[in-house]
Image: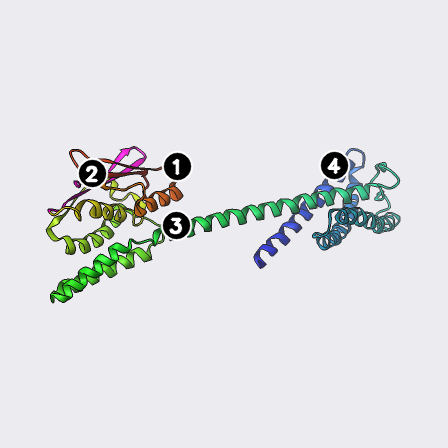
Amino acid sequence: MIRVNWRRELQFWMFQLAGWSIWIVMLVLRDMTFVPSEYLLGRVSVFVVDALIGMALTTVLRYLYRAVWEAAVTIRVLAVFGGCWLASQAWRPIKVLITDSDFGSSVDLTDYGWATISVWLPVSMSLLLIWSVLYFFLKYYQLFQSEKEKSLRSESLAHEAQLRMLRYQLNPHFLFNTLNAISTLILVQSTDQANAMVTRLSKFLRYSLEHDPLDKVSLDHEISSLNLYLDIEKVRFEERLHVEYDLESDTRQAQVPSMLLQPLVENAIKYAIARSESGGTIWITASRCQKDKLCITVADDGPGASDHPTSIGVGLKNIRDRLQEMYGDKFMLVSSPREPRGFQVTVVMPYEIR
């Protein structure tokens, strides 16, 4: 908050100096057409003093406008006209004093050599009104920008919160099955296997919690984390679970959302491997399907589309929502039967290298 106030204060004084400097330059340019050059420097000095007084008076107006900022529109309008009129009346005798002195005797500061618009609206009054209009315009513009930043920040935080929520919806069935498998190993006194499984589970959970949902990791890194998950599942399914990789060399360093593959593989294990007494195979492939696109496919040789509720699966829905938040409309998530049997899910996303 202090930083914002300091920035606004700095902006105000920058506009003050710029605005009054422009006013001085306008008067000097006007005088250059008819004032001899030897008198020009003296007149410039008078204009600078007059501008400094105008700067002081408009600073007082600024505090007046800030005091009535929350008031009704009528009060603010009256404050503008009343404040400008009082400031111009206070400015006029100072101008007369400068004009009557030896310092500014050659300069008419009362109306700067221009005719007044009317008896009630001299040039000084007009100048202060113009300053006031510019002040309110810039003030409202700053407020608009501030509200826009707040809106964007709120939207960003909402998206991040949604991604975090989606990210941490780890399938409870996986934890239940893993803990049940560890319990079984302990009962049959396979302590080494149980210890190894606990170690793998802790590593996998640590990875899933440490990586932010907005993080992108290399495909190689993602495969490493997936192997932690698969090592756990292989304890349960043993020889029934086979996994084969086919990754093109230029895809290994491609950036993908962290924890992208695990829900897809979990889906294949749940609906293909676990339902077959002989188990099955899961294929994970990655390729450059287009020059600027990365295609990743997770396929299985299970019973096929009839046993894959991909439209309602929480894991796949979360993936779709995460990709939507991260890539907008620049991704595709396609599920389809695999020939001659099985099911596959393909993710198409922008090809990015860190």
The amino acid sitting under disc 4 is: Leu
Residue 75 place in picture, x, y as percent: 77, 49
The amino acid sitting under disc 1 is: Asp
For label 2, the residue is 304
Alpha carbon distance from label 1 to label 2: 28 Å
Mark with earlier residue (1, 3):
3
Alpha carbon distance from label 4 to label 1: 56 Å
Part of the protein shown in magenta: 278-306
Q: Nearer the viewer, residue 329 or 123?
A: 329
For label 4, the residue is 29
Report the disc number at residue 329: 1
Q: Nearer the viewer, residue 253 or 176?
A: 176
Mark with earlier residue (4, 2):
4
Q: Are marks 4 and 2 in contact (CB under 8 Å)?
A: no
Alpha carbon distance from label 1 to label 3: 17 Å
The amino acid sitting under disc 3 is: Leu
Question: What kind of element bears circle 2?
Answer: loop
Mark with earlier residue (1, 2):
2
| Mark 4 neighbour density, 10 Å: few (under 14) some (14–19) many (20 or more) | few
Residue 162 place in picture, x, y as percent: 41, 50
Mark with earlier residue (4, 1):
4
- Would you identify the image quadrant in which residue 123 lies? top right
Alpha carbon distance from label 2 to label 3: 30 Å
Mark with earlier residue (2, 3):
3
